[in-house]
Amino acid sequence: MDSTSFFSLKKSIVFLWFVIVFVADHSLANAQGNRNREIKLGAYYFDGWTGRYTQHISPKLMNSFAERKPKWGWITSSQKIVDQQILAASGAGLSFFSFCWYYSGKDKYKGEPLNNALKFFQKSAYTGKMQYCLMVANHKGFEIGKEDWAIVQAEWIRQFKTAGYLKVDDKPLLILFSVQSLIDNLGSVDSVRSAFRTLKTAAISSGLNGVTIAACVSGDKRSISQAEECGFDILTGYNEHNAGLASKTTQQIPIDSMQAAEKRLWSRVVKTSHLNYIPVSTLNWDPRPWSAPNNKYDTAPYFVGYSEKSVYKSVSGMVSWMGKHAAQITHEKIGILYAWNENGEGAYLTPSVKGPDFLRGLQKALNNN
């Protein structure tokens, strides 16, 4: 080979090497960028659909809001239907369910109908498709006091050790609905802090790395400060419809109002607190099927315009907001939707025979982002 041919070959090899390195680096950057954009999105799961609490499947819900009826029927708390819900939810892009968990007393909570779906989820052949965590619904009727703490602590740790339990910072995530109820029933802020220390110590003793405890807050400074003083690790929410209904003078409020208001609420929380945040998107609020003399839902404001398109906008808005606030959210980029099946309150993704295809809106939003 003459010198000209040799140098020509050498130049070609060098050029080819630079092409390979450039393509590899570019592909890696794209892959990392895609991972950076991904979020782990879940939905709250309310198991009021056992038929055991008749006020949930009310006559008004069945007769005047038939479009909310799931394609499986009103009673969805069975192994077969929970299996199908896992497939539907995971197929649309949801990563986990956060089950509303109820403590109804020492000798009653294990048979509590409101916890049935969680048991079916754990027994399902499809549990590998989704993770789960507990959202302890410690509101009126399901309070947790000092005498209950050792009992619930043991049950929570048992749940934490299951294979599919959701973790934040490599520690199982536990969400508590009412900070005030916890303070009232444990006795003080200091008692709450002490109970949390006991829980985390017990978790570590059982082989876990601890517990990440999240507080549902309303977004105002008082609720945030209260959660911080109690020793919560992160902040989140459950149903934040009041943010979208504030200062409204009519009963029917466009759902767009909620989508705009929740972004302001999320931003206010992360500006107010040093704790990381799990944003919750309130997909809808229309509890008229559950109207009763004590709640005045018949005359209270509610959202209109809930649709496949509105789900798309809600989820897209959350993804966009989380992308801009990566430093304030969890490392796992967790977001939650209210809700998978709050059918009585109008916030549901469950497929129905007559209603819009909400899951298609969810899937489109996740795919586009």
Image (cartoon, helix red, strand yellow):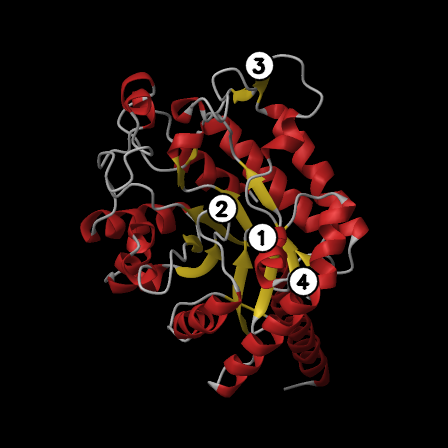
Distance of mark 2 from mark 1, alpha carbons?
A: 8 Å
Distance of mark 1 from mark 3, alpha carbons?
A: 30 Å
| Amino acid type for the residue under numbered disc 4 | Ser
Tell whether label 1 touches label 2 (CB within 8 Å).
Answer: yes
Residue 131, position as x, y percentages in the image: 41, 61
Distance of mark 4 from mark 1, alpha carbons?
A: 10 Å
Which one is closest to the eye, mark 2 or mark 3?
2
Q: Is residue 356 above or below residue 278?
A: above
The answer to whether any part of residue 333 appears in the image is no
How packed mark 3 is, by other alpha carbons closer than 10 Å (few <14, some 14-19, many 20 or more), is some
N-terminal label among 2 and 4: 2
How packed mark 1 is, by other alpha carbons closer than 10 Å (few <14, some 14-19, many 20 or more), is some
Instruction: State the residue lying farthest toward the left.
Output: 80
Quarter of the image with the N terminus in it: bottom right
Tell me the residue at 66%/65% (across/down): 233
Task: Please tell me in which quadrant of the rendered image residue 182 appears.
Answer: bottom right
Task: Write down the residue under mark 2.
Answer: 140
| Amino acid type for the residue under numbered disc 1 | Ser
Task: Write down the residue under mark 4.
Answer: 188
Q: Is residue 266 above or below residue 25?
A: above
**Residue 147 - label:** none
How packed mark 4 is, by other alpha carbons closer than 10 Å (few <14, some 14-19, many 20 or more), is some
Instruction: State the residue lying farthest toward the top.
Output: 250
Tell me the residue at 54%/41% (across/down): 368
